[in-house]
Image (cartoon, rainbow, N blue to C red):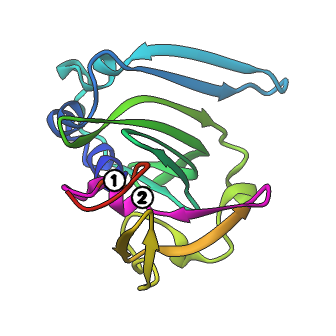
């Protein structure tokens, strides 16, 4: 996910296109002043069309991701902040679905909220949690489905289940952490 967010920040449409599935969909949920939501659906291809290129400077950052992986599918849910030309435009929640296709993780579908008034509520208390960039995840060695995994952030407990921040693994070739596990 870090690589994809860097590509969004760089407005690198070609790299984004290569990292996502063309059949996928996005749903942008924009908070209205009256408390309702405006939901706009678009294909993944919309966001990488050549006419979307512009001269703005973008920066997207996220923190505290909850990552769930099963076989060749994964979901990442995380609060984020989005800047345009060095100014915070909005914050919200990102939800990315990934599919492992031909050995590579691809963004298959995504949803996000656009909440300009929610930044104070959503920003992390510890700025070192912000990704990508900044301080790296805590160095640890953990066994997960029989695979030794380096550089995993500490566990989060959600509804009495333990989730590990394994988002760095989504970028690693040759690692299968689905049922049965094992390095490829």
The numbered dot on residue 170 is: 1
Above-or-below relation of 99 to 89: above
Above-or-below relation of 79 to 157: above
- State the image coordinates of residue 108 (x, y, percent, origin top left): 37, 28
Q: Nearer the viewer, residue 19 or 130?
A: 19
Please report the bounds of the magenta region as a residue range.
158-175
**In the picture provided, is 87 more to the left or to the right than 171?**
right
- State the image coordinates of residue 145 (x, y, percent, origin top left): 44, 62
Q: Nearer the viewer, residue 142 or 2?
A: 142
Q: Find out whether residue 123 is within the magenta segment.
A: no
Which residue position holds label 2? Answer: 167
Query: Residue shown at 28%/18% (left/top)?
Result: 45
2 and 1 marks in contact (CB < 8 Å)? yes
Q: Nearer the viewer, residue 1 or 128?
A: 1
Say which quadrant the C terminus sits in: bottom left
CA gap, disc 2 to disc 1?
A: 5 Å
Above-or-below relation of 13 to 42: below
Q: Secondary structure at mark 1?
A: helix
- State the image coordinates of residue 159 (x, y, percent, origin top left): 79, 55
């Amino acid at each position: 996910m870090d690589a994809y967010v860097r590509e969004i920040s760089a407005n690198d449409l070609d790299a984004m296109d290569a990292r996502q599935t063309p059949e996928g969909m996005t749903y942008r949920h924009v908070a209205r002043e009256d408390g309702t939501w405006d939901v706009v659906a678009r294909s993944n291809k919309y966001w990488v069309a050549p006419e979307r290129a512009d001269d703005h400077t973008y920066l997207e950052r996220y923190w505290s991701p909850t990552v769930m992986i099963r076989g060749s599918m994964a979901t990442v849910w995380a609060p984020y902040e989005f800047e345009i030309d060095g100014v915070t435009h909005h914050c919200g929640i990102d939800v990315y679905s990934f599919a492992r296709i031909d050995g590579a993780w691809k963004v298959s579908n995504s949803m996000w909220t656009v909440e300009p008034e929610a930044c104070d509520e959503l920003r992390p208390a510890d700025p070192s949690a912000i990704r990508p960039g900044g301080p790296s995840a805590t160095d640890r060695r953990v066994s997960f489905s029989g695979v030794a995994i380096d550089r995993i952030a500490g566990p989060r407990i959600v509804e009495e289940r333990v989730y590990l921040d394994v988002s760095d693994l989504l970028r690693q070739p040759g690692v299968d952490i689905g049922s049965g596990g094992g390095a490829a």
